[in-house]
Amino acid sequence: MPDLLWDDHVAWLLDPSDGSCLPDVYVADTTVADWQAVLDLVVEQRWAFEYSEGEAVLPLPRAATVLSRPAGAECPNLRVWPDPEVCAIFRFLGEEQVDFDVDLRELQGQERLDVLCGFLAAIGRRLGKSVPMYFEGDTREPFLGYDIAADRVRLLWTAPGAGERDG
């Protein structure tokens, strides 16, 4: 059974029509070893990926190499496709946080939602940490994510007034 049901739970949350298309995913309190665990997971799962620095596409380096780049160097990107139609873009901003975003336009429907849930769960299980997803540019309150305690992806937010509809 899926962690989340598209029609019952998240279609309204993952609606890209409001112009906010790139929710942010942050795994806090990480280390270089955690970043390396994510890179190893990408390779082990045989997910398609592309590592780049600026315009140059390069072989996937070790996390320690990427995170020790000189000050002022361009921020590398790692594009990961857990499914040919779903891409996550990791940015190596610092070792203390694994961060990436996904495009809501690629996450429409139950099948793609299941891909996202599996991807978040794989990362969370590998790191032993929750993997929250936030509205683009707003890290105050996550709206869904992998919950390590529940060992599943679940909704973490409800729309204001949602509990008042039945009343």
Image: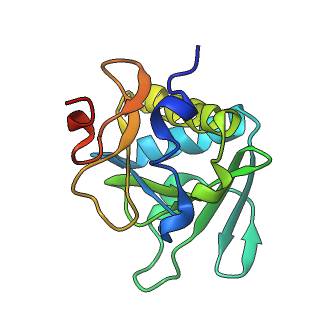
The reply to whether residue 21 is in sight is no
Q: Position of residue 145 (x, y in %)?
A: 40, 37
Instruction: Determine the residue positioned at 29% across, 41% down.
Output: 157
Measuring from the top left, give residue 90's x and y in whole percent: 54, 58
Closer to the camera, 120 or 103?
103
Q: What x and y, as percent, mark residue 115?
A: 65, 35
Q: Nearer the viewer, residue 153 or 15?
A: 15
Can residue 75 be seen here? The reply is yes
Which image quarter holds the N terminus?
top right
Count the numbered circles shown.
0
Quadrant of res 99: bottom left
In front: 133, or 113? 113
Question: From the image, which quarter does the C terminus lie in?
Answer: top left
Q: Residue at x 27, y 46 (%)?
A: 29
Residue at 56% across, 33% down:
7
Q: Residue at x 40, y 29 (%)?
A: 154
